[in-house]
Image: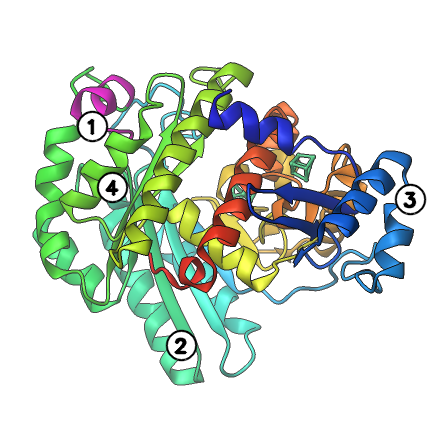
Amino acid sequence: MTDARRCITASAPRSPHAHLIQSAIARHVFVSNGSRLFDADPDLFEALDSAITDGSVDDLLEQVGLGGAPAIDDQPLTAPPLHALSLAIAQKCNLGCTYCYAQQGEFGGDAKNMSQDTANRAVDLLVAGAEPGARLNLAFLGGEPLVNRTVLQAATRRGAELARERGLTMTFSITSNGTLLTEADADFFEEFGFAVTISLDGPRETHNALRMYKSGQGSFDRIMSNLQPLFARQRRMQVSARVTVTPGNVQLKRTLDEFIAAGFHSVGFSPMLSAPNGNGEMQAGDLELMLGAMIECGHEFERKTAAGERYPFANMVNAMREIEKGTHRPYPCGAGAGYLGVSADGDLAACHRFVGDEAGAMGSLGDGIDLKARADWLADRHVHRQEPCRSCWARYLCGGGCHHEVIKRGRPACDYIRGWLHYCLEAYLRMGPQGAAARS
Ligand code: SF4
Ligand code: SF4
């Protein structure tokens, strides 16, 4: 049996309360309430296994002292403070990626840039309600944000200045296709300590087949050449690669090793689950192949970390930290809560992927946040309101899956998500605190 099949089989949901993990040398129970991990002696393990089968495991957990009040109740988050905004600063793009969620940057509308006035008002909204000492993030996305560099730079300066005046911390991030980066951008991003994420889909030939200019020409060589000044300068700035995984680029280990060697601070993978035109969407068989490739990368992370070497595989680093912390959350992300997206026209959306989409409309810069839309969203999107999440042991680590993908396509990736988490729990148990201490 492959590693991927074994993890999918072992992680199939049997109980909403607990998940059992058995290795050659030890047995463990993951308690969903509070995302807590415990050792179990053979007798307890066997009793838990039987209780999961007959539906009484909740009572048994209580009896053996692993119960407790629910860490997450049914109440939706109310009036979360805004701490992050992403600006669709340019709803236009110079690439024509086969699967683009933003439909070549234009989100199904006209190509446009955000005006300086709109960007200023967005920055003001972010700062306006912040408590002294708050930590805020201003993100630039598109389309390709560097198409509108002047507005991006002015908004950054305004954000930094307002934050300084009011005793706030403001961090900056950008997601770019990398084709328009210049040496001056590298200086600017380093000055303001940007988290720079570059969308790259694999080694040259793989990337070029998926992310090409509208002329059809590949973009890889230009991007790698543009990145050299960023790699040379990154101190405050961190330059990461984000790989969107489609059936055409599942060779993840080679991609990871090449990108780490190239100088990226970290490298992360996300499966393509919903594209406006359906292109590149992962099906069950593709996701199983991807899971196998993720586990292969995970094994390398375990080996390198044990040898004291850095191996910045972002998915694994994040999973180790979340397991260590016992992350338990009622939502998968901050979308529609502390995080909102802003369209080039100044409309507010649940996140960058809902720009121009009624399903995630949240008001506008002119009228303010639509408080009813936000309250309805937070009530509807709570993981306790999601099926089949309510009966899934992984629900508080997962949060119910990306809202955008779930609304557009449903939940085709649950076996993949649980299989990956099962592997990560096993790896965490093998590595101990050393795994959670690994830095991306
Ligand atoms: S989306 Fe996440 S929480 Fe919901 S059923 Fe799938 S794996 Fe479980
Ligand atoms: S809804 Fe999906 S795309 Fe939007 S912030 Fe959450 S995880 Fe990201």
Q: Identify the image quadrant of residue 65.
A: bottom right
Task: Pick the residue in front: 196 or 206.
Answer: 206
Whether the residues at callouts 1 and 4 have beta carbons within 8 Å, the answer is no
Residue bearing the label numbered 2? 163
Under mark 2, the amino acid is: Ala
Under mark 4, the amino acid is: Val
Q: Is residue 109 visible?
A: no
Q: Is residue 159 visible?
A: yes
Q: CA distance from mark 1 to mark 3?
A: 50 Å
Boundaries of the magenta span: 200-210
**Which mark is on residue 56?**
3
Q: Is residue 203 above or below residue 298?
A: above
Viewer-nearest of discs 4 and 3: 3
First in sequence: mark 1 or mark 3? 3
Viewer-nearest of discs 2 and 4: 2
Residue bearing the label numbered 1? 203
Q: Secondary structure at mark 4?
A: helix
Q: Secondary structure at mark 3?
A: loop
